[in-house]
Every structure is written in C-alpha cells, then in structure tokens.
Image (cartoon, grey):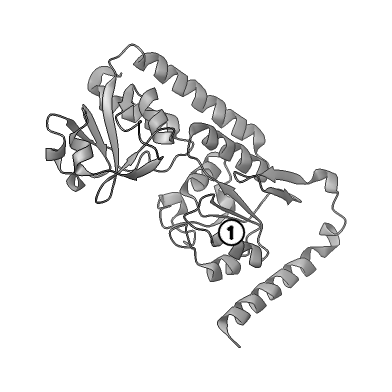
Amino acid sequence: MGWEQIRKLIFCITVLTTACQSAPTDRYRDTANNILLVDATGLEVTLQEPARRIISLVPSATQILKALGVGHVLVGRTDFDNEDWVISVPSLGGGLAPNFEKIIALNPDLVVLFAGDQDPHTRSRLDDFGLTQVAIRPDRLTDLYASIILLGQATGTEPVADSIISTIKKDLTDLQRWTATRPTIRTVYLLGGSPPWVAGPDTYIDEILRLAGGRNVFSDLEFLYGSVSPEQIRSREIDVVLVSDRSQFDAMLTPGARIEEIGNTLEFPGPNVAQAARHVAELLHRDLLR
C-alpha cells in the first residue's frame, strides 16, 4: 500500500472515529444555530458550533486568535509564530505548502490559510481530506478588520472582535490627527531580499506609512509588493529607510537618508497594528512623538 493510500486511510479512520463519538448530538443539532462564514475568497463555510481546534497557517490569524482570547484553541501554527505563548504548539512549516500529515493528525475543525496565488495546492489538498477551511488575505486595513470579524464569528467571540476593531480605529485616528501637523517624511520600507523588495501602493504597509506621517516613495509602482533595482532606489528622494535588519542594507544606495531598523513589526498585520503604526511614527519623527 502506497503512502498516499495510507494517509487517506488514516484520515478516514479519524473521521469515522470522530463521527461515531459525536453522532448522538451532531445528528440532531439545530441547524438554526449554525455559523455561516464567508472568507476572503467568497467561499461560504458553515460551522455547527464555534471552532475549538484551529490550525493557523497565517501568522496574522494566530495573533488575532490570541487577541480574541481564544489562543487555547490553536492546535497548529507556522514557523513564523515564535512568541512564547505559542511556541509549544506544533509547527506545520512556513504556512505555504504545509505538512499535511501533521495537519491530519491534529484533527482540526477549522484550518485558516492564506488567500493567494503563491500556494495554489493547499486549498485543494485540504478539500481532498475533507477539512473545513477559511482563507484570509490582510493586504489592507479593511482586510485585517474583515479577518478579525471572520475569526470572531468562527470562535463565537464577535463582541470581542468588534471591540478590537473599534480600539484600532480610534488609536489610528488619534495618531493621524497628530501626524497631520507634522512634516511629511519621504520613506521607503524594505522587506529584504536581493534585489530588495518594497511595499507598493494600496498595501497595508503603504497605509501605515501615511498614517504615521510618511509618504511611501514607491507608491507609484504597479504592484503591491515586488523587487526594485539599486538604480531605482538611488533615483528616489528618500528621507528615511525602514529596514528589518540594518546589516542587510547598503546605506550607500541612499546617501543622506536616515536608516532605521524596525524588525518585522509591519510584516505580519494583526491586532497590534496601532502600536506598530505608532512605532513607525516614532522612528520617522524621532523624539517629536511623546
């Protein structure tokens, strides 16, 4: 028997065992109490009850679950989820093309994945194994809010989700009110790589830079994220360069610009977005923000 057949057999045994254990209640569950979810791709998913075993293949989703107060339902994470509270949860890889054998063994009632073309096979593989899934794609702040609402619905914590979003919006409004009176700082955010990748227009990072009193010098690009040549960087007038790791950037590309190391604060849009935006504002305006 091949490994593919063995894997399907394990899955079938898991499903049958779970079904036998829950049949007395699930068979007669009131369908009026079902939870209808619509994910970032428009897929409609129905849960009979709030999810209690969730695998998160998106670091943003992991952070959202913790903020919702349901971090305990997380049974699987990515390698990028490395905070102390989640480190004991099994990792399934980088998030794209995860370890499906581990996913099956964890017996999740919901898998949260990234809605994008970078990983075209994960969704179909989860379908093959009959696993319930929802996809999120927090490209912009509105997408982040939608992700918080979606996971709040999935875990029965809608009031908490609403409260988180209200707090974020208030904090960002307060920050924007402050930066509106300050000079606009011409800024580039480099995600690393060689040649380096930058954040383009209509992205979460582009929004944060504007809220923090900056102007994304690559807001005229025709893509959300992509690589730019050293010549393109040299041709721009830049006041501040934000980099995750200062040692990975050649400061000679931006003579006269201030280099600020920011870490990965902005790379995983989550419920701490207002704090991240304030940190960016502090770096751009230095000691003006107090």
Q: Residue at x 52, y 46 (%)?
A: 61
Position in image of residue 127 (x %, y %):
65, 62
Which residue corresponds to the image point at 53% horizontal and 59% vertical from the top-left?
120
Q: Within the image, what quadrant is residue 184 found in?
A: top left
Q: Is residue 233 above or below residue 11?
A: above
* Residue 125 percent across, percent down from the top left: 59, 65
Graded by Cα atoms within 10 Å as few (under 14), some (14 to 19) or many (20 or more), the crowding at tag 1 reads some
Residue 50 vs residue 251, the one in the foreground: 251
- Is there any visible trace of residue 93 in the rendered image? yes
Q: Residue at x 32, y 24 (%)?
A: 214
| Residue sitting at the far top | 181
* Amino acid tagged 1: Arg
The percent position of residue 115, horizontal first and vertical second, equals: 54, 49
Q: Which of the two residues, 227 or 28, is positioned nearer the viewer here?
A: 227
**Vertical placement of 26 versus 160: above or below?**
below
Q: For the N terminus, give its image quadrant.
A: bottom right
Residue highlighted by disc 1: 123
Position of 91 with respect to 191 (left or right) is right
Determine if residue 155 is in view.
no
The mark total stands at 1
Q: Is 87 on the left or on the right of 257, as rendered?
A: right
Question: What is the residue that sits farthest to the bottom in this orientation?
Answer: 1
Measured as percent of width and height from the top left, residue 2 is found at 58, 85
- Quadrant where the C terminus sits is top left
Q: Dot 1: what SS?
A: helix
